Image: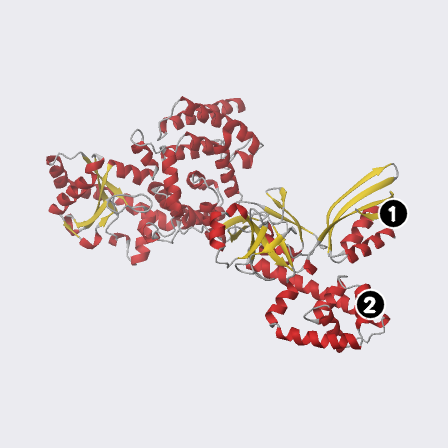
Amino acid sequence: MIVANAIKENKLIAKEYKELLKISYQSLNSSDRKLIRLAFNTSVDAHKQQRRKSGEPYVFHPIAVAKIVASKIGLDATCIAAALLHDVIEDTEYSENKIQKLFGRTITKIVVGLTKISKLKKEKNVSLQAENFRKMLLTLNDDVRVILIKIADRLHNMQTLDVMSPEKQIKIASETLYIYAPIAHRVGLYDVKSELEDLGLKYTEPEIFEEIKNKIEQSKYEQDKYIKNFSRRISDKLRKEDINFKISGRPKSIHSIRNKILKKNISFEEVYDKFAIRVVYKSEPETEKFIAWKIYSIVTDFYTPNPLRLRDWITSPKSNGYEALHITVVGPNSKWVEVQIRSRRMHEIAEKGYAAHFIYKQGKQTDNGLEGWLNRLQEVLENSETSALDFIEDFKLNLYSNEIFVFTPAGELKSLPKGSSALDFAFSVHTGLGLKTRGIKVNGKIVPLSYQLKSGDQIKIIKSENTKPSANWLDYVKTSRAKAKIRTALKEEKKLLAEDGKEILRRKLKQLKIEFNEKNINRLANYFNLRTSLDLFYRVGIGKIDNALLKKFSASNNTLFNFIRKNISKKSKEISHTEKEIKNNFDQLVFTNNEEQLDYSLAKCCNPIPGDSVFGFLTVQDGIKVHKKTCSNSISLQSKFAYRIVKAKWIDSSQEDFRSIIKISGIDNLGIVSEITKIISNSLNINMKKMSFDTVENTFLGTITLDVKNKTILEKLISRLKKINGIEKVVRE
């Protein structure tokens, strides 16, 4: 019995495959067929153990999606293959690398894009994430084909929604109405949009859906009779004019009727345009517009038009590519009737979206056919200035080109400004997480804190309680929130160090028999050319001002010194407060992203001073010349010689970290490495960058790379490390 069922299922799968090839909207050559066959076989193999909720083999789903892609959307073999594979990476053992080996980069990129969208965390309340999800769809991929296949995927899911629980039915249907139907309309897929809307209504408001559906079926006979009566006189006249045409009735979708009932507060019977009459004619491209208006003239000869309801989308097509002439006339029995006038080309575009352009361009233009259409569609999606009122009644579909959309490890969506770094993301999640960021993984790989994020990236923050922000972090972040939090943290750290420094200074002055009072503190600040007592305490705390310097102060603290000091202070008062502040805060120029100290000279054209926003210009003879960014020559230099521009900035050297390497050797005791790292981690103003240990029998040799504020701090650390049991030698390289 099991074998018989398997044979039966295989026959059905083979039948579906043949139908897929038959219904393709595009013409398929032998290489296209080979590609689709390979994708089909891969999909069958990948999903062979899987079944849908309905009990049927899972592979029926990707085949059905591929059929929608081929017939309703009109995409080519590449997209049909991608549709067949769209769940393979997400749900099976097939990896991204394996798919790329089999199908190349283009198809793999599409499949990966679809996988990323599928991973998006869905909230119970659809509206919470829906808007971000919609924007995500439109910005996640450079390749718009991802969106189109996703629409096809959603259509088939809606067609088979019966097997789901009522709760899931409502959730998926609501999401479809809010996100997918408007996007389908946006890309010109009217038929797909209508079907999505009707299926959405079927599950969100089943009673109303059934009521309107039944009423439409009951009135179908009368409608057909009315359309025949309306068309008779027009058809005769069109034949006399030798116009090749077809007249048909188009029923309004159930969802559209429902919207009209709600909007106008009327009954089903009062909806006058429950159907439209469509005239589709055959013509050459150069006579399309002429014949359309000729048909308009014939229709209005028999029936009075409403001039306020005239819509000329031939002269000015909708942004989704729709072209047609719409008129509303008073038909038999004084009923309002909408008449849609389209050429065959316009009709194809209305039914299939921009895919239809491919058919009409083939052999006539060198526009790369489908690629040209995809590029045009991408442009439409990116055009945020176009009025959305013409094609979306429910909401405006805007694109946010200045935003990127990334995932947390749990699948939650976060939006950030374009150009944001991985560190920006950490601060966007939580300030505490940002400040304790030790490392960052993007898509499973460790990246630098400055790594620039792209839409679709999944980010994991590696946290450490011992991590503290450094001044360099300000160069890594873009968002104002992250910058503000880092600056606040740096100020707080400075205050803590200043508190320690205050106590250290109190002890050292006592040893030098100098009273610790406001007068002497101000003297010290003046002596070291510092603005405030906080700056003084901070520099003592980090070891910048040590015993030797304090002894020099003590020695110079005599009558002669006081006389000189008074004269100096008089001159210093003549210097503006701003200049003094700048001089005290910024005393060193560094270049490039690595903040290298290089030889330079200041440009005479703008005379930059410490603290100015500057850039370096690499001259032919004089090395690096430093200019103000506001320099009159700035624009000229940066536009003509961009390759010779060097990034530069003023820094406070007291805030700078210095790279240092220490070598440690000794006897390999249990837990000695843990003890070393603990001492380093607990030391203020020391950041461990790299560590390696080699063991030979019972001895070890370790190399540790550190960032430290100054020599004093490093010497204190070395002294503490030497006290560890088992360590024989600690030297600075």
On screen, residue 7 above or below 669: above
Query: Which residue is at 81% across, 55% downward?
Result: 715
Circles 1 and 2: CB distance less than 8 Å?
no
Depth check, front residue: 591 or 697: 591
Q: Earlier in the sequence, mark 1 or mark 2?
A: 2
Nearer to me, 330 or 590: 590
Whether residue 46 is visible to the viewer of this picture, yes or no, is no
Kind of residue at badge 2? Lys
Q: Which residue is mark 1?
A: 727
Q: Which residue is mark 2?
A: 551
The reply, left or right, for residue 339 in relation to residue 17 is left
x and y percentages locating residue 3 in the rendered image: 53, 22
Q: Residue at 37%, 29% (x, y): give it.
A: 24
| Residue closer to the observer: 450 or 144 | 450
- Taking depth in this image into account, of 201 and 686 the one nearest to the observer is 686
Give the image quarter of residue 428. bottom right
Q: Position of residue 118 (x, y in %)?
A: 51, 42
Q: Secondary structure at mark 1?
A: strand
Which residue sits at x=59%, y=70%?
578
* Distance in Å between CA atoms under marks 1 and 2: 34 Å
The amino acid on which the numbered mark 1 sits, given as a three-letter code, is Ile
Q: Position of residue 566 (x, y in %)?
A: 71, 77
Circle 1 Cα neighbour tier, 10 Å, few/some/many (<14 / 14–19 / ≥20): many
Count of residue discs: 2
Helix, strand or loop under label 2: helix
- Up the image or down, 433 lies above or below 373; here it is below
Nearer to us: label 1 or label 2: 2
Q: Position of residue 163 (x, y in %)?
A: 47, 40
